[in-house]
Amino acid sequence: MSQEEKIKQELEDKFSYLSGKVNITRARRIFFSVDLQNLAEIIKFSKEELKFNHLLTISGLDEGENLSFVYHLAHDCGLILNIKVSAPKTNPVLKTVMPYFVSAEIYERELVDLFGAKVEGLPKGNRYPLTDDWPQGEFPLRKDWHPAKE
Amino acid sequence: MHDSHKFNIPMGPQHPALKEPEGFSVALKGEKILGVEIRLGYNHRGIEKACEQNTYTQDLYLIERVCGICSHTHATCFVQAIEEIAGIQVPKRALYIRTLIAELERVHSHLLWLGVAGHEIGFDTLLMYSWRDREIVMDILAMLTGNRVNYGMNTIGGVRRDITPEQANDVLKAVSQLEERTKYYIDVATKETTIIKRLSGVGVVSYDDAVRLEAVGPTGRASGLDRDVRRDDPYAAYGELDFKVITDNHCDVFGRTIVRVKELMESYKIIRQTIANMPQGPIVVKVARKIPAGEAISRYEAPRGEDVHYVKANGSEMPERVKIRAPTLANIQVVKHMLKDRYLADMPIVIAAIDPCFSCTDRMVSIEYDSNKKNETISWATLHDYSIRWHRERGTDFTDLNKRFKAGLKV
């Protein structure tokens, strides 16, 4: 059994709701989606049990009604786990994953600034990457946001 | 000074270490740093947004300009993601050429870093020497690609320029020259008292902290963190090449210096292999303008550490989303940790030791004219005019000088 299949098996054995949902897209790449409320336990399990000890980044996506967020976790063997969650655009609330990955802070701030995500548990600090006087409610990476024409 | 006195000193955004903007707010007690807050974003240029409004090919040229040093890095990382989504089999020769350019880029970047590090510790002889030698690799890159930076080698499905046997020969000659010089730098870095004393015990990150803070690149490897995307998640031709991942256990700026100079030797080894083993055949395959819907994540070991690109395609000519995570962003938490409880005077070299690149990290030009108006993206011509006007208002006017230049007069 390949490393990818082993990880898939362990995930599906641990979380019944993942059964049949975990896709191995190529060598060293695994993608799947989960409900928002299950994210924390999957991240915890992936880090502590499966040893995915490196958060590469979090990618935000504007998918119309929803905003989606892909957590890219890497293993020392080169495998990447891509976990996608979605939240309604009207109230895109996430919980910080900083308890598992300290590095998440800057990636989560990026989601706050560019997508308008609300991240619970994020400590106070400088925003990133927009300016301090950036107008409220303007989220540049949402699809309905366009830079003003000259 | 009274013992309880604590000062907050703003440093930057112009410019605490390298020639790029970043803001630091340093809490000091005497000369000791109690804590550091870092403000990034001064180089945010909206590249990810712009990518969604341009075709894949246009994006490739834009993304090459995310960084002036790791230009091949970003272009390759991006193009790999597209090729994976579209299921393109890139010709082997193209993969070898990509690897060759990648390692030449690492050589120029590491030599550049060595000079900067020398400069930051007041050892400018090292700056002069290493930057002189860096010209050898810059000339080679210019010969192979037509440019010193922003090589434009990549295209979706392969590379744009082939390497002739004569060019390959020139590369080998240059590599031998560089190798001799690098041996000298390894000698200097490991034996020169000034360097050892100045860099040892500065900017310390233990192995456990490097793991916890997820340090990437030479910064992590100098703390014994044995991670290198080239070996762990091989791309281009790395899977077929023989090289060592350099690690060190000094856990300080001295260790980071050793890792980088030794990595240069590994790069020469890789360059020789790419030339010796380069398969014959085509360098590019034709690719449709529309990329089928899908997603991919691509990694690349940049000179500064791991670069990550996530691309989502929607079946059109333009990507749905492009996400870039440059290595410096991953090392920001590490810098904060390195500076804590250290002396203010160590700050420049500690920051420089991660080899930061803030233009990679930030990426948006967006100018706010006034707080009531929406932010606007400024065109090059407007920015140019604005700059002329700004200087003229302050008494500097180059109009006359430009006219004299055009007329071919001596100034």
Image (cartoon, coloured by chain):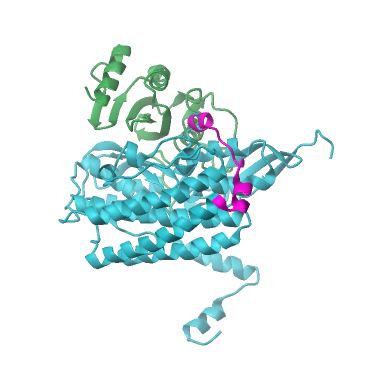
Chain colours: A green, B cyan
Please provide the residue range marked out in magenta. Answer: B191-211
Q: Position of residue B272 (x, y in %)?
A: 30, 55
Picture layout, residue B170 above or below residue B211: below
- Residue drawn at 33 percent across, 28 percent down: A81
Q: Residue furthest right?
A: B2
Res. B224 in view:
yes
- Residue drawn at 34 percent across, 60 percent down: B151
Specify whether residue B196 is painted magenta.
Answer: yes
The rendered magenta stretch, by its main secondary structure, is classed as helix
Res. B325 in view:
no
Q: Position of residue B213 (x, y in %)?
A: 51, 32
- Residue drawn at 34 percent across, 42 percent down: B230
Q: Position of residue B212 (x, y in %)?
A: 50, 29
Q: Position of residue B50 (x, y in %)?
A: 38, 49
Q: Looking at the figure, which quarter contains the N terminus of chain B?
A: top right
Specify whether residue B360 is painted magenta.
Answer: no
Q: Is residue A120 left or right of residue B169?
A: right
Picture layout, residue B165 above or below residue B155: below
Q: Quadrant of residue B397?
A: bottom right
Picture layout, residue B339 above or below residue A52: below
